[in-house]
Amino acid sequence: MYAIIRTGGKQYKVQAGDVVQVDKLDQKLGAEFDINDILMVGGESTHVGQPLVKGAKVTVVVTKQAKTRKEIVFKKKRRQGYRKFATHKQEFTELFVKAISLDGKSTKADATPNVVDVAAKRTEAAEARVAARKERASTKGKGEEVVKKAAKKTVAKKKVAKKAVKKTAKKATAKKKTAKKASKKA
């Protein structure tokens, strides 16, 4: 069974178990409520409302209240020197469709709603960044000693590599000299 609901001046096709993002609603996070603006209910039999289907309701749970990604708003009138730049984040509410019912018949979702508190997640991430910054600052002096030891090792490796290059260069020049002597004798 599916339903076409109207909220925020827009229409959405939903089924039990769907997650839908709609314009911001004044509901608390985790709140369960009914939507009664049902324009159509379909499935085995279709019921079209004029304008609403009587006796139909969709039960939803608020799973998230947040803002969308940043959208760029750019306005320009050519040859007029008019350019305007702005950004916008639209607030939205994410709904989990728990059940659709009409005249005693109903379909329920098998899954459970996953409620996400975006503000709490954001504060946890900020606290984790601050803790990491403090930890880096406390180990900064200790890390310099490790870096100095590593630098000494790389300098020693470079010296060994230079010696090896010099030895191979000497061998190559010695071979050239013997080759010249052999060609003069012949």
Image: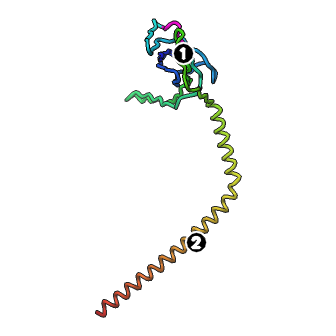
Q: Is residue 122 covered in magenta?
A: no
**Which segment is the magenta one?**
52-57
Decide whether the magenta segment is chiefly helix, strand or loop.
loop
Q: Where is residue 36, by image quadrant?
A: top right
Q: Nearer the viewer, residue 29 or 18?
A: 18
Q: Nearer the viewer, mark 2 or mark 1?
A: 1
Tell me how far mark 2 sits from mark 1, CA to CA: 74 Å
Q: Is residue 138 left or right of residue 115?
A: right
Confirm whether residue 171 shows in the render: yes
- The picture places residue 3, in percent across and down from the top left corner, at 48, 16
Q: Where is residue 48, by image quadrant?
A: top left
Which of disc 1 and disc 2 is earlier in sequence?
1
Name the quarter where the C terminus is drawn.
Answer: bottom left
Residue under the image location 44 percent in, 79 percent down: 169
Residue under the image location 47 percent in, 16 percent down: 4
- The picture places residue 40, in percent across and down from the top left corner, at 46, 12
Q: Secondary structure at mark 1?
A: strand
Judged from this view, the residue extending furthest toward the right is 138
Judged from this view, the residue extending furthest toward the left is 186
Q: Residues within 10 Å of mark 1 (few under 14, many from 20)?
A: many
Q: Nearer the viewer, residue 77 or 30?
A: 30
Q: Residues within 10 Å of mark 2 (few under 14, many from 20)?
A: few
Residue under the image location 59 percent in, 23 percent down: 62
Which amino acid is tagged 2? Ala
Q: Secondary structure at mark 2?
A: helix
Residue under the image location 45 percent in, 82 percent down: 170
The residue to which callout 2 is attached is 156
The residue to which callout 1 is attached is 58
